[in-house]
Amino acid sequence: MARPAVLLGAGAGPYRRARRDRAPYDLWQQRGFLETTPGASIDYGFVAERLAEIAQDCDLRMVAYDRWRIDVMQAELERRELPINLEPFGQGFRDMSPALDTLEGELASGRLLHGGHRC
């Protein structure tokens, strides 16, 4: 199962960022779809610890990442000796379009079901 997670620095405030980006970050946070990290920017140490917690609770096989600042995230994972499989995944049309087409097909066919399970 894929478990989407979005992490956002809390210091800027999800509500202010929601208004700025015209995305409902504050609503997503209230509903548990988005987690914030301490501070005004992404705390990669916090993210690494959160990934370790998820890996303990779930069969974490891979984490897709955007290439921006992955070196910082990799250093945090290595420092904690967390063997997490990282797979590059761009945020542009080249990577997103085929992935969304596949997701849409799986959902439409009924092959992808999600009952609200954590793992």
Image (tube, rainbow, N blue to C red):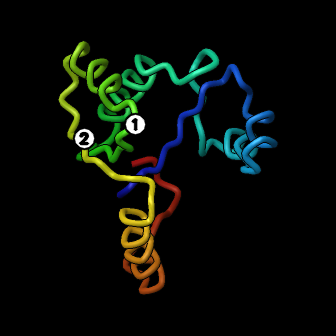
The answer to whether residue 94 is left or right of residue 11 is: left
Q: Which residue is rendered at x = 37% and y = 65% of the image?
A: 94
Q: Which residue is rendered at x = 45% and y = 47% of the image?
A: 118
Residue 79: x and y, percent?
A: 24, 13
Q: Quadrant of residue 19?
A: top right
The answer to whether residue 34 is left or right of residue 19 is: left
Residue that carries the numbered disc 1 in the rendered image:
68
Disc 1 marks a residue whose amino acid type is Trp
Q: Which residue is rendered at x = 40% and y = 17% of the image?
A: 45
The answer to whether residue 102 is left or right of residue 26 is: left
Residue 115: x and y, percent?
A: 50, 63
Residue 104: x and y, percent?
A: 46, 77
Upstream in sequence: badge 2 or badge 1: 1
Residue placed most toward the observer, 30 or 64: 64
Q: Residue furthest bottom?
A: 109
Secondary element at image label 1: loop
Secondary element at image label 2: strand
Residue 78: x and y, percent?
A: 21, 19
What number is the disc on residue 86?
Answer: 2
